[in-house]
Image: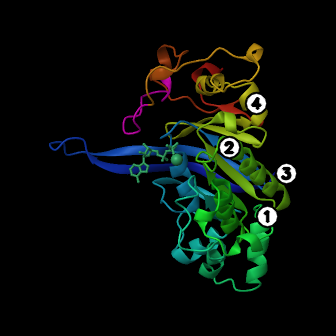
Amino acid sequence: MSTEKFLEVSGLKKYFDVGRSTLFSSQSRSLHAVDGVDFTLRHSEVIALVGESGCGKSTLALLLMGLEDPTEGTVMYEGRDITHLGDHQRKDLRRKIQMVFQDPYESLNPTQTIEEIVTEPLAVHGLTHERDERVKKAMEDAGLKPAEVYLKRYPHELSGGQRQRVVIAAALVLEPEIILADEPVSMLDVSIRAEIINLLAELRITRQIAVIFITHDLGSVGFFADRVAVMYLGRIVEIGTMLEVLEKPQHPYTKALISVIPVPNPRLRRERIILQGETPNPIDIPTGCRFHPRCPVAFATCNASDPPMVTLSKTHQAACLLLVK
Ligand SMILES: Nc1ncnc2c1ncn2[C@@H]1O[C@H](COP(=O)(O)OP(=O)(O)OP(=O)(O)O)[C@@H](O)[C@H]1O
Ligand SMILES: [Mg+2]
C-alpha cells in the first residue's frame, strides 16, 4: 500500500436548512448532517465508515462525490482542490470516483439490458474506443463470467447478488480509482454478502481501487478493511487500523458498537454495553461531547468541552476527554 495521500478531507461540514421550528419562530433551523470530518484515504486502501443510521455516512459520501456542496471544508484529490468544481471538471472526476448504492433493484433501470446498463457510463463520458472489450472486462472483473451469458438479459432475470455485480461492473467500466460503496450488501441475502465483500477485496488488489465501505454494521467489516472510521452525529469519533479499532477500541461509543457484534464462541462473548436513549437529533447536537448524554462513562465536564482528537498511535485517534492527558 502506498502511503501517498490521494484523497484528503478536512473540516468537512454539511448543514441542511430545515425550516423554522414553529410557525411563530423567525429563526430557521439547521441540521448538522456532517459536522467537521477529517481523514485521508491512500491509494488502494479500504476504509470502513461505520455508524448508526442518521450519523451522516451517506451525506459524507455525496459530498465526496460532489453530489452535495459542502457548507465548509475541503476535499483534495491527488493534490487538487475538488470541493467546488464546475460541471465539466466534475464530470471528468466522476470517472475516477464511482459510487455503489445500497439497493441494486433501485439503481438499475429495469428496461435496459445488462449490456446497455454497463455501456451507458462509457457513452455519457464519450468513450467509444474499445467499447465492447471494456464492457466485457468490467463484467468479468465483477464476477459476471462469461459476460456473453448476461449481456442480453434484464435486471429482473438476475439474483440480487448478480444485480449488485452489474452495478459494480457499471462502476468499473470507467476504471475508477475510488469506489464509494454505501451499504452495498445490506439489502442482500446474508449468504451472498460475503461474495460481494470478497469481490471488492479482490478489486483493490487486481485494479488497485481504494474503497470507502459504508456500513452501520461493524460486524460486517470483517477482514476486509485496512482502517475503520467510526462516525457519531456527523463526526468521526475514532479512526485506526482494523486491529486497533476492533481489538483496542478507545472511544466509549466504539466499545459499545463492538460489544454487540455477535461472537460464535460463547466463551469469547463480551459484556454487551447497551447505550441509553436514542441517537440525538442532528438539529439539536448536545453541548460539549456530542456523545455524553448516552455515554456510560461520562463525567462532570463532558457536557462542557468538545473533546479533541487524541493521538494514540501513528494510525489511531479517538475523541474522548478520558483520553486527554
Ligand atoms: N437533503 C437533506 N435535507 C435535510 N436533511 C437531510 C438531507 N439528507 C440527509 N439529511 C439528514 O442528515 C442526517 C444524516 O443523514 P445520512 O443519510 O447521511 O445518514 P446515514 O448515516 O447515511 O444513515 P443510514 O445509515 O440510515 O443510511 C439525517 O438526520 C438525515 O435526516
Ligand atoms: Mg445512508
Q: Can see residue 192?
A: yes
Amino acid on which disc 4 is placed? Glu
Task: Name the residue located 62 percent from the left edge and 72 percent from the top edge.
Answer: 117
* For residue 190, side relative to residue 203 (left or right): left
Instruction: Give the Cα separation between the discs numbered 3 and 1.
Output: 21 Å
| Residue type, mark 3 in image | Met
SS assignment at label 1: helix
Which numbered disc covers residue 48? Answer: 2
Residue 207 lies, with reference to residue 319, above or below; the image says below
Of marks 2 and 1, the one in the foreground: 1
Label 3 crowding class (10 Å Cα cut-off): few <14, some 14-19, many 20+?
Answer: few
Q: Which residue is rendered at x = 81% and y = 51% of the image?
A: 3
Residue ID for mark 3: 1
Find residue 141 and name its label. 1
Mark 4 vs mark 2, CA separation in Å: 13 Å
Name the N-terminal-most of marks 2 and 1: 2
The CA distance from mark 1 to mark 4 is 32 Å
Q: Is residue 258 magenta?
A: no
